[in-house]
Image (spheres, rainbow, N blue to C red):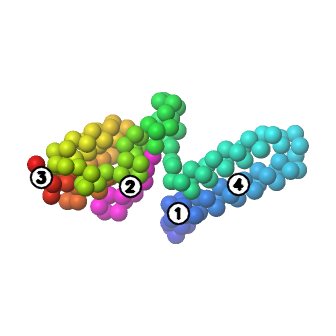
């Protein structure tokens, strides 16, 4: 059982994922060096792996199914979020990616304005993640008590 936990922790560790990618790049480079017939194929794989390292370093994750379906990088953005119990989920945030979107209550003049923007993004994210109750995850950190009402301190 400890092995499963170790693998899970390694998978959730950014350093471990980058380490594995670098290890694979080294193996591909060795294969490309010794086997001339597959050299260009290995160089192509190395370029893809370097792209994967870049995505890991900059926390830019994509859902390949959504990317294939829409052809849009921005619509296929994926974000790791945790619920109040500490469970981690991979959520397709698309155009409402929280790192780029960065909603804060200070950005809104009224609670209604904040609620409308939050609902718009929550509905968009929910449509792409039907198995997860997105509102309970409070992706943007605007609903501290998870009652569905965001930025309650703002005037109506």
Q: Are marks 1 and 4 in contact (CB under 8 Å)?
A: no
| Element carrying mark 2 | strand
Gap between marks 2 and 4 measured at Cα: 28 Å
| Residue nearest the viewer, comparing 91 with 143 | 143
| Element carrying mark 3 | loop
Q: Position of residue 95 (x, y in %)?
A: 40, 40
Q: Are marks 4 and 3 in contact (CB under 8 Å)?
A: no
| Image: magenta residue range | 78-90
Mark 1 = which residue? Answer: 13
Q: Residues within 10 Å of mark 2 (few under 14, many from 20)?
A: some
Q: Position of residue 63 (x, y in %)?
A: 49, 41
Q: Position of residue 5 (x, y in %)?
A: 50, 66
Q: Is 84 colored magenta in this rendering?
A: yes
Residue 155: numbered disc: 3
Mark 2 = which residue? Answer: 81
Q: Is 145 colored magenta in this rendering?
A: no
């Amino acid at each position: 059982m400890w092995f499963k936990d170790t693998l899970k922790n390694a998978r959730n560790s950014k350093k471990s994922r980058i380490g594995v990618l670098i290890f694979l790049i080294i193996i591909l480079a060795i294969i490309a060096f010794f086997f001339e017939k597959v050299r260009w194929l290995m160089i192509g794989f190395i370029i893809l792996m370097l792209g994967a390292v870049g995505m890991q370093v900059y926390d830019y994750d994509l859902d390949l199914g959504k990317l294939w379906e829409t052809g849009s990088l921005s619509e296929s953005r994926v974000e790791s979020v945790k619920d109040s119990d500490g469970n981690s989920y991979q959520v397709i945030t698309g155009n409402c990616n929280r790192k780029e979107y960065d909603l804060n209550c200070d950005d809104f003049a009224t609670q209604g304005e904040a609620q409308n923007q939050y609902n718009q993004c929550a509905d968009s994210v929910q449509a792409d993640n039907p198995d997860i109750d997105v509102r309970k995850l409070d992706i943007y950190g605007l609903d501290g008590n998870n009652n569905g009402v965001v930025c309650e301190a703002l005037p109506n």
